[in-house]
Image (tube, rainbow, N blue to C red):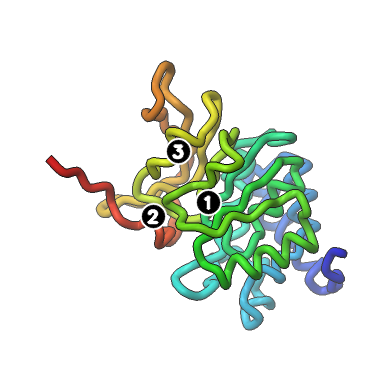
Amino acid sequence: MPYPKDKDMETARNLMVDDQLRPSEITNLSLLSAMRELPRECCVMPDQQSVAYADITLPLGQGRVLPQPLLTARLTQAVLPVEKARVLVVGAATGYTAALFAALGAHVTALEANIHLAEQGQHFCQQEALNVSWVITPLSEGAVGNAPYDVIYFDGAILHFPAFCAAQLAASGTMAGVMASSNKLAKAFVARREPESASSFIVTNLFETQLPLLPDLAAPITFEF
């Protein structure tokens, strides 16, 4: 059974959509509807619930965050439509983005390494998004059991594409997230495979932004010769 809806929070959700999302070219009606319905306040720490719909990134503890609503909306809109698609949410944390993709008709695998965050996310999805399956394992491993994925979505910044993407992304699949850099501003992106390539991707930068790194994917790739 979904969480009971608080009237004040319902008002805050509608303000988020009407004042933050719609003026910023979020136009997909299904996405707007889903973000009006999902109780984002259930995915943050109790002392953050009053600002759950503010245009800010919220800390979840242990170096993890819930990205600001507009960032989530812009990246999600960039990979639509996802109806009946297989979507992997990497760093699913407390489940908001996984539930959002599920509300848009996707078959979602939520990948999380932090047991405490995953427990909260599983509980949230049991209430709001039953078509989400959870895999609790290091993020660097991906989730091979439900691969290949039409969409791999990183719910936190990365420094490079993890090695599992080459094997677990469908041939015509799309990746989306935020790519960080040590000396430049981070950039939201979408990426697709280069033709005839298993491990090279064509990256399209969308906009500059800020988002903390997913801890399990923070180390740069090193090579041994």
Q: Say which quarter of the image contains residue 46.
A: bottom right
Q: Is residue 110 left or right of residue 7?
A: left
Q: Are marks 2 and 3 in contact (CB under 8 Å)?
A: no
The C terminus: image quadrant: top left
Q: Which residue is at 48% across, 29% downward?
A: 192
**Residue at mark 1:** 90
Q: Which mark is residue 138?
A: none
Sequence-wise, the earlier of marks 2 and 3 is 3
Q: Are marks 1 and 2 in contact (CB under 8 Å)?
A: yes
Toward the viewer: 10 or 134? 134
Q: Which residue is at 35% across, 45% downward?
A: 160
Q: Amino acid at mark 2?
A: Leu
Q: Sort mark 2 into few (<14), some (14-19) or many (20+) by Cα contacts within 10 Å.
A: some
**Residue at mark 2:** 217
Sequence-wise, the earlier of marks 1 and 3 is 1
Q: Which residue is at 48% across, 56% downward?
A: 156
**Residue at mark 3:** 165
State the SS at label 3: helix
Q: Sort mark 3 into few (<14), some (14-19) or many (20+) by Cα contacts within 10 Å.
A: many
Q: Say which quarter of the image contains residue 127.
A: bottom right
Could you tell me how far apart the alpha carbons at marks 1 and 2 are, in whole angstroms? 10 Å
Could you tell me how far apart the alpha carbons at marks 1 and 3 are, in whole angstroms? 11 Å
Q: Is residue 48 above or below residue 121?
A: below
**Residue sitting at the far top:** 196
Q: Amino acid at mark 1?
A: Val
**Residue sitting at the far left:** 225
